Image (tube, grey):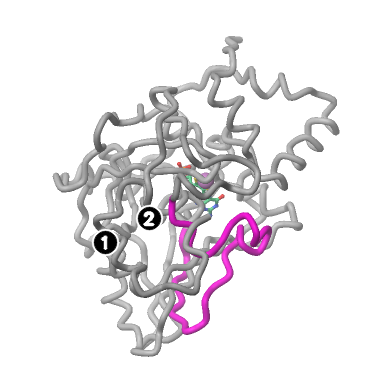
């Protein structure tokens, strides 16, 4: 077997992993009678293709690249192998190395329910949705609250397109977005102290912003399960936990949703969670981030560098904790 040394960012990351997961991982390691070093020297990863069945949406990709979204000054695309094997998906465990376990998730049939304050509730079949949606590719930066980041080419469609399709009533102020729940296949969901299912929320104004993107593919291919197939969100100006994976329901509501991480620890993970280098997390600085592709530490930018597109959303929001 091949072993590799942990990279510096992996060590850094373990220092900033949310406490619940860190404690949990230590407990599991202790119970298994192995030290943290055993995890750090994980075997080299085999190619993904061998582990995955052919996705029924494969023929839709690649889709046309929208040139208005670029990596940004001094940034380069993260290698595909890195972005698809270093993933956060607590449904499959609290480590980054869950991509094999995520292959257990059946992604067909898959439906997405649009309900709550809408003209009429709808249940959409994912393949019908993919056939109808205006798919395009966008290169986005992604900044995790744990101070690592990547630059990836997502394929998908604007969230605003789906909002229009849902026909929300005028009183709807928020989208409450929910992940699948199935502890038979998602081993992490057997950890009953977490408030499953994973939930996230955005305001109607945030959902209407052109940057809010529903992701169905990556690197010109269908989205791998570990990255949130068949449907996940990308909100590149917010910390990564807002970009919810494995979406099965979007409910329109006038009540602000309480998100998964907010419910676990509201003082550390707020509703808005806009990226801001000047507002530290309670347990670490947010001034810099580790790019997982280049392994370089770089300065973090306000709104992750997307302020020109999103700052206006917040100009009249004065009474809220906009950061962290
Ligand atoms: N359902 C669900 N969505 C999720 C998560 C999760 O654990 N479960 N993790 C979030 C976090 S913390 C991040 S940083 C991103 C990671 O996306 P990636 O693994 O595709 O990079 O997914 C987000 N979406
Ligand atoms: Mo994250």
| Rendered location of residue 182, percent (x, y) | 62, 58
Q: Which residue is mark 2?
A: 235
State the image quarter where residue 23 is shown. Answer: top right
**Quadrant of the frame with the N terminus:** top right
Q: Marks 1 and 2, how far apart in space?
A: 11 Å
Mark 1 neighbour class, 10 Å CA radius: few under 14, some 14 to 19, many 20 or more: many
| Rendered location of residue 180, percent (x, y) | 54, 61
Write down the region rendered in magenta. Answer: 247-275
**Residue 52 in sight:** yes
For label 1, being within 8 Å of ligand 1 is answered: no
Residue at 62% of width from left, 55% of height from top? 268
**Above-or-below relation of 125 to 225:** below
Q: Which residue is mark 1?
A: 158
Tell me which numbered mark, 1 or 2, is placed earlier along the sequence. 1
Please name whichever residue, 164 or 237, is drawn nearer the observer in this view of the structure: 237
Q: Is residue 269 magenta?
A: yes
In the displayed structure, does residue 23 sit left or right of residue 199?
A: right
**Residue 64 in sight:** no
Please name whichever residue, 136 or 293, is drawn nearer the observer in this view of the structure: 293
| Rendered location of residue 248, percent (x, y) | 47, 65
Residue at 48% of width from left, 32% of height from top? 85
């Amino acid at each position: 077997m091949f072993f590799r040394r942990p990279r510096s960012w992996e060590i850094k990351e373990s220092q900033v992993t949310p406490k619940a997961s860190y404690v949990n991982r230590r407990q599991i390691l202790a119970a298994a009678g192995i030290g943290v070093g055993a995890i750090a020297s994980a075997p080299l990863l085999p190619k993904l293709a061998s582990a995955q069945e052919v996705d029924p949406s494969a023929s839709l990709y690649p889709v046309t690249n929208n040139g208005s979204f670029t990596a940004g000054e001094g940034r380069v695309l993260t290698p595909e192998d890195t972005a698809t094997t270093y993933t956060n998906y607590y449904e499959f465990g609290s480590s980054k190395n869950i991509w094999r376990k995520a292959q257990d998730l059946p992604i067909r049939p898959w439906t997405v329910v649009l309900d709550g304050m809408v003209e009429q509730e709808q249940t959409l079949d994912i393949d019908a949705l993919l056939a109808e949606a205006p798919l395009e590719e966008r290169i986005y930066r992604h900044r995790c609250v744990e101070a690592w980041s990547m630059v990836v080419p997502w394929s998908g469609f604007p969230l605003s397109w789906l909002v229009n399709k849902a026909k929300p009533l005028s009183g709807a102020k928020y989208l409450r977005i929910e992940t699948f729940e199935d502890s038979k296949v998602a081993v992490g969901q057997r950890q009953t102290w977490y408030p499953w299912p994973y939930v996230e929320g955005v305001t109607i104004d945030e959902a209407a912003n052109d940057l809010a993107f529903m992701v169905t593919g990556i690197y010109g291919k269908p989205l791998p399960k570990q990255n949130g197939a068949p449907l996940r969100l990308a909100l590149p100006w917010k910390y990564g936990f807002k970009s919810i994976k494995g979406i099965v329901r979007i409910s329109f509501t006038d009540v602000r949703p309480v998100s998964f991480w907010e419910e676990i620890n509201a003082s550390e993970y707020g509703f808005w969670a806009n990226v801001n280098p000047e507002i530290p997390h309670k347990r670490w600085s947010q001034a810099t981030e580790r790019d997982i592709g280049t392994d370089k530490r770089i300065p973090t930018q306000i709104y992750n560098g997307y302020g020109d597109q999103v700052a206006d959303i917040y100009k009249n929001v004065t009474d809220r904790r906009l950061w962290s």
